[in-house]
Amino acid sequence: MEDFSFPKSSRLTGKKQISLLFNKGKSSLTFPFRTLILPVEDNQPRVLFSVPSRNFKRAVDRNRIKRMMREAYRLNRHRAGDASVMIAYIYVSKEILPYSIIQEKMISTLCNLSSNASKN
């Protein structure tokens, strides 16, 4: 049975870790996400979800998008394999996209992550 939980230990927190990810991480764009990835020695991936207030002024909209991103990640994180990385998903679209598109693109980024990890 697969574990679909998203515990706090899987979330990226702490200013030092986040600034390290933003300064040294590799960036890629899979619309509607800009993804920052940094390999670490940790045993599980740690994830950060961000929606800029520049694009969405209302907190209700930002929170809705983050909920959809977290749900798509939670259900599909097994596709990333055993990659031990820090990941930041930054939502770059100017409009709220349907969950089906967000999930499809999340799967795409996770599959790319697993294929890149297997090459290294």
Image (cartoon, helix red, strand yellow):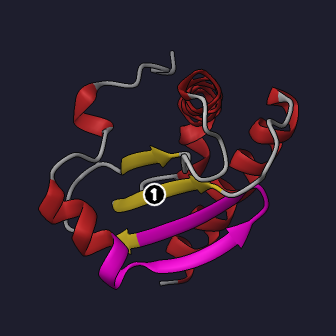
Query: Magenta stretch containing residue 4, yes or no?
Result: no
Residue with the mark numbered 1? 88
Question: Which segment is the magenta one?
Answer: 22-37
Left or right side of 119 for 55: right
Q: Amino acid at mark 1?
A: Ala
x and y, in percent, of residue 67 in the image: 57, 24
Residues 115 and 40: in front is 40
x and y, in percent, of residue 78 in the image: 55, 40
Predominant SS of the magenta segment: strand
Q: Residue at x 62, y 65 (%)?
A: 34
Q: Residue at x 75, y 65 (%)?
A: 30
Left or right side of 31 for 39: left
Query: Magenta stretch containing residue 32, yes or no?
Result: yes
Q: Callout 1: helix, strand or loop?
A: strand
Residue 11 occupies quadrant: top left
Position of residue 92 relative to residue 69, above or below, is below
x and y, in percent, of residue 111 in the image: 68, 58
